[in-house]
Image: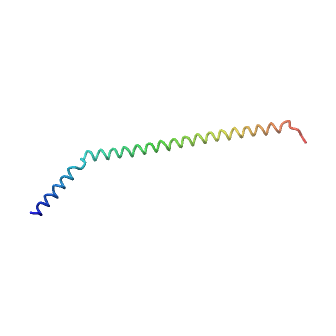
Amino acid sequence: MKKVLSIIAVAALSVAFVSCGPSKEEIEAKEKAKADSVAAVAQAQADSLAKVAESEAAAAAEAMAKMSADSTRMADSVAASSKGGKKH
């Protein structure tokens, strides 16, 4: 009799644990939320990388413009100093 009661108790506990678990819809909702979260992170990462590339391109263009202006200014300075300077 003890064995029968033990088996019934184990079966009842097993049914209780299974019935208290999440439903199929809840599991699917969790998986969808997880996938959406991963997609949002991937999109944010791509946006961030695009911003970095854009700022690097802008910085490179600014550096090139500055180098060009410096070269022009230096050439003008050299040209001005070679014209009409005093000879020793």
What residue occupies the far front of the structure in this picture? Answer: 2
Please name whichever residue, 32 or 15, is drawn nearer the observer in this view of the structure.
15
The residue shown at (28%, 47%) is 27
The spot of residue 58 in percent (x, y) is 58, 39
The spot of residue 68 in percent (x, y) is 68, 39
State how the image is colored.
rainbow
Quarter of the image for the C terminus: give it: top right
The residue shown at (43%, 45%) is 42
Please name whichever residue, 58 or 24, is drawn nearer the observer in this view of the structure.
24
The spot of residue 56 in percent (x, y) is 57, 43
The residue shown at (47%, 41%) is 47
Total count of labels: 0
The residue shown at (8%, 63%) is 1
Q: Quadrant of residue 6?
A: bottom left
Is 12 displayed left or right of 62 in the figure? left
Is 42 displayed left or right of 80 in the figure? left
The spot of residue 5 in percent (x, y) is 11, 60
What residue occupies the far right of the structure in this picture? Answer: 88
Please name whichever residue, 7 or 45, is drawn nearer the observer in this view of the structure.
7
